[in-house]
Amino acid sequence: MSDELKDMVERGRFKGEIRFDEPLSGHTSLKIGGPVDIMVFPEDPLSLKNVLRAAAREHIPLFVIGAGTNVLAGDGPIEGIAVSLKAFRSIEVTQESDENTAVVFAGAGTPLGMLLGLARKNGFSGFEPLTGIPGTVGGAVYMNAGSYGTEIKDLILSVGLMHPQGEIQVLGKEQLKFSYRRSHFPEGAVILSANFALAKDDPAGVARLMDEYMAKKKAAQPLAAASAGCVFKNPEGDAAGRLIDAAGCRGMREGDIEVSPVHANYFINRGRGTCRDFLVLMGKVRARVRENSGTELETEVKIIGAMER
Ligand SMILES: Cc1cc2nc3c(=O)[nH]c(=O)nc-3n(C[C@H](O)[C@H](O)[C@H](O)COP(=O)(O)OP(=O)(O)OC[C@H]3O[C@@H](n4cnc5c(N)ncnc54)[C@H](O)[C@@H]3O)c2cc1C
């Protein structure tokens, strides 16, 4: 595959960067992850298409990494191709069709914070409860990221994606069957962009609400520590953090991975934590919660290049 990629570059069929044996620890907020065989940073849709097609033809596993803020990557080596859409960073107000609504287009590699920044500046309302969620637009759409009762699906109009053979398609939100921290994209599809519908409002009011949500989040979550956000999904009608706490797991540690003393559904990397430590701690916490409350916690973080035990 590496020869094929080099050939693509020489023939002008791939524009962007290609790295071999790239440590994923540099691409995840947990700072965990061994070397992946190949990591590509395509600069345009055609380059992405050529990589997707080559990987499909040769049956090479391929996955997208956004900002890696919900990812637990294996200690490696990790087989396959990691794709970063950092270059797909664009944002545009495409429509202010009527007095009340604005439509905003964002490329998948756009930091979510940048999109919220545009909404704040223009007084476009809807995103406020999502303030403080790190990551990219592509990752937020794939995960249906949400907080304080709002999910990103509530604001999505449509999503642009590329199939493994390179065809581009735009799907309406009803076709994607979003649910709690889940989306249903066609197998192997890469999200390219999304359109959002926002309500036009007073910029000062939007900014005030965003600041309030940020302050709330800062007080309740260890935002500055190395984590991957919530490890487990909240079970229906309850909070995983509350169950983990009730089972006495707050502060539990495996190697350098610790159940956060601030929010028990966050596991923190205190320095040299590994994927193995993280998975062992997940297993221990899950067993204690099961024993204490009878609830089976479902994993929220996306595990790449490793197996849950
Ligand atoms: C401190 C902290 C706080 C957080 N708070 C919240 C919160 O309040 N609410 C919440 O929902 N989440 C939260 N998260 C989790 C995380 O930030 C979100 O899930 C975020 O939307 C993930 O975006 P990302 O770009 O980092 O995606 P990644 O973590 O890189 O990827 C997540 C998944 O999406 C897939 N993916 C990413 N981009 C694409 C693409 N373009 N096409 C196809 N698949 C893609 C990846 O393959 C992976 O399976 C938090 C995380 C941290 C570290």
Image (tube, rainbow, N blue to C red):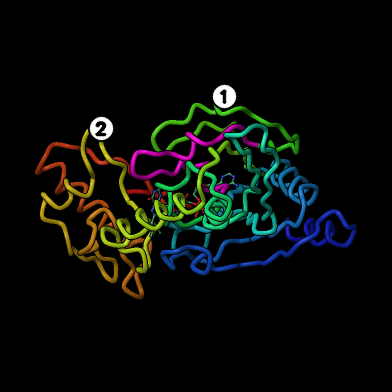
Residue 174 x %, y %: 54, 24
Report the amino acid beneath label 1.
Gln
Q: Nearer the viewer, residue 60 or 8?
A: 8
Residue under circle 2? 236
Q: Which of 8 and 104 is in front in this view?
A: 104
Q: Does the residue labelled 1 lie within 8 Å of ligand 1?
A: no
Q: Are marks 2 and 1 in contact (CB under 8 Å)?
A: no
Residue at 33% x, 44% y: name it: 148
Q: Earlier in the sequence, mark 2 or mark 1?
A: 1
Q: Which of 166 and 115 is in front in this view?
A: 115
Residue under circle 1? 175
Label at residue 241: none
Residue count near mark 2 (Cα–Cα under 10 Å), binned few <14, some 14–19, many ≥20:
few
Queried whether the magenta region covers residue 212, the answer comes back as no
Count every numbered label the image shows and give the total.
2
Residue at 70% x, 46% y: name it: 55
Q: What element carries label 1?
A: helix
Q: Is mark 2 on a helix, strand or loop?
A: loop
Residue 64 x %, y %: 59, 50
Residue 88 x %, y %: 69, 53
- The furthest residue to the top: 174
Residue 219 x %, y %: 27, 61
Residue at 52% x, 36% y: name it: 155
Above or below for 272 versus 222 = below
* Quarter holding residue 196: top right
The span picked out in magenta is 137-159
Report the amino acid beneath label 2.
Glu
**Is 73 positioned to the left or the right of 5 in the image?**
left
Q: Nearer the viewer, residue 100 or 295?
A: 100
